[in-house]
Image (cartoon, rainbow, N blue to C red):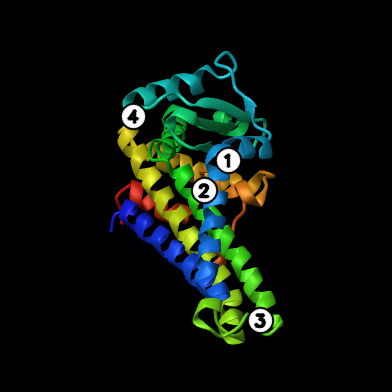
């Protein structure tokens, strides 16, 4: 199954989840409230997510005079991809990493850390930048924002369901949601399901961006080597970043093992490298 089809199905599943939980909490009215809530959150995220994440990470504009290599590679790749050159920012941190943000290619920004620029050779840096430009070209940031805001609405409804269960439910008629047991199940299971779906969407888009970068550069091994370097360095040099922004980076600053991988927004580095090198 292609990553695009998988992403579409997962977004549909996430939307079905919010409608189902809304129905359990408040029947037909609950579903309408849930959809209005998600729409309002999506509208805000669509217009302001780039400014929020740049401020959250304290990224600063990076001039061409200060990083001619980054600007030259970005211009060349954007020309190949047929997209506008995004605004380029710097995080003055020695932990190597990068992220992209913005609602579409015409309103996009890319940020790199000082550690990334210092650590990567030409082909590796090109691979990382191409990965971020692939996110921009395919509007992955918008997809992630939509998934995150719908998931957030599910969390709000689950919280309402929890209080409804505590106080004996909102009634048992078809139009007023279910009783205590359905509300309690919604409060427990809905947030877990939402997180699992959001994480699966994010992992799917990371694989797609890796493939897009390989196609854009014609050199998948450059990105594969970069990912291995990033994985090794990120374990030695921590990148202090807000949890809410960690999913946007090419390598997640916060690591998880075992069951935590189910909720990870990034696929394992070994899997990404294997796909790039054609060993899976």
Is 132 left or right of 4, judged from the image as shown? right
> Quick check: 77 above or below 252?
above
Residue 18 percent across, percent down from the top left: 50, 65
- Please identify, in this view, whether the residue under mark 4 or under mark 2 is nearer the observer: 2
- Mark 3 in CB contact with mark 1 (< 8 angstroms): no
Is 178 left or right of 2, judged from the image as shown? right
Q: Name the image quarter holding residue 180.
A: bottom right
Front residue of 28/276: it is 28
Label 3 to label 1: alpha-carbon separation: 34 Å
Residue 111 visible in the displayed image: yes
First along the sequence among labels 2 and 3: 2
> Which residue in the structure is indicated by mark 3?
165
- Mark 2 in CB contact with mark 3 (< 8 angstroms): no
Label 2 to label 1: alpha-carbon separation: 8 Å
> Considering the image in quadrants, where does the C terminus appear?
bottom left
Residue in the image at 66% along x and 76% along y: 162
Residue 89 percent across, percent down from the top left: 59, 27
């Amino acid at each position: 199954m292609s990553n695009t089809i998988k992403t579409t199905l997962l977004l549909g599943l996430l939307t079905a989840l919010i409608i189902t939980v809304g129905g359990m909490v408040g029947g037909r009215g609950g579903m309408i409230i849930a959809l209005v809530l998600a729409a309002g959150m999506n509208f805000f995220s669509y217009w302001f997510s780039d400014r929020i994440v740049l401020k959250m990470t304290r990224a600063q504009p990076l001039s061409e005079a200060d990083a001619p290599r980054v600007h030259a590679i970005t211009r060349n790749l954007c020309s190949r991809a047929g997209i506008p050159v995004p605004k380029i920012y710097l995080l003055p941190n020695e932990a190597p990493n990068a992220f992209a943000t913005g609602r579409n290619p015409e309103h996009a920004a890319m940020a790199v850390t000082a550690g990334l620029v210092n650590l990567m050779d030409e082909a590796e840096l090109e691979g990382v930048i191409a990965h971020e430009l692939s996110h921009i070209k395919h509007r992955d940031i918008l997809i992630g924002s939509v998934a995150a805001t719908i998931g957030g609405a599910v969390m709000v409804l689950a919280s309402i369901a929890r209080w409804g269960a505590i106080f004996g439910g909102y009634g048992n008629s078809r139009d007023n949601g279910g009783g205590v047991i359905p509300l309690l199940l919604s409060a427990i299971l809905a947030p877990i399901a939402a997180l699992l779906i959001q994480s699966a969407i994010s992992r799917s888009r990371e694989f797609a961006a890796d493939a897009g970068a390989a196609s854009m550069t014609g050199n998948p091994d450059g990105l594969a080597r970069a990912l291995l370097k990033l994985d090794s360095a990120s374990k030695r040099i921590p990148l202090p970043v807000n949890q809410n922004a960690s999913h946007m980076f090419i390598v997640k600053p916060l690591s998880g093992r075992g069951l935590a991988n189910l909720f990870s927004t990034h696929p394992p580095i070994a899997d990404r490298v294997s796909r790039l090198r054609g060993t899976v």
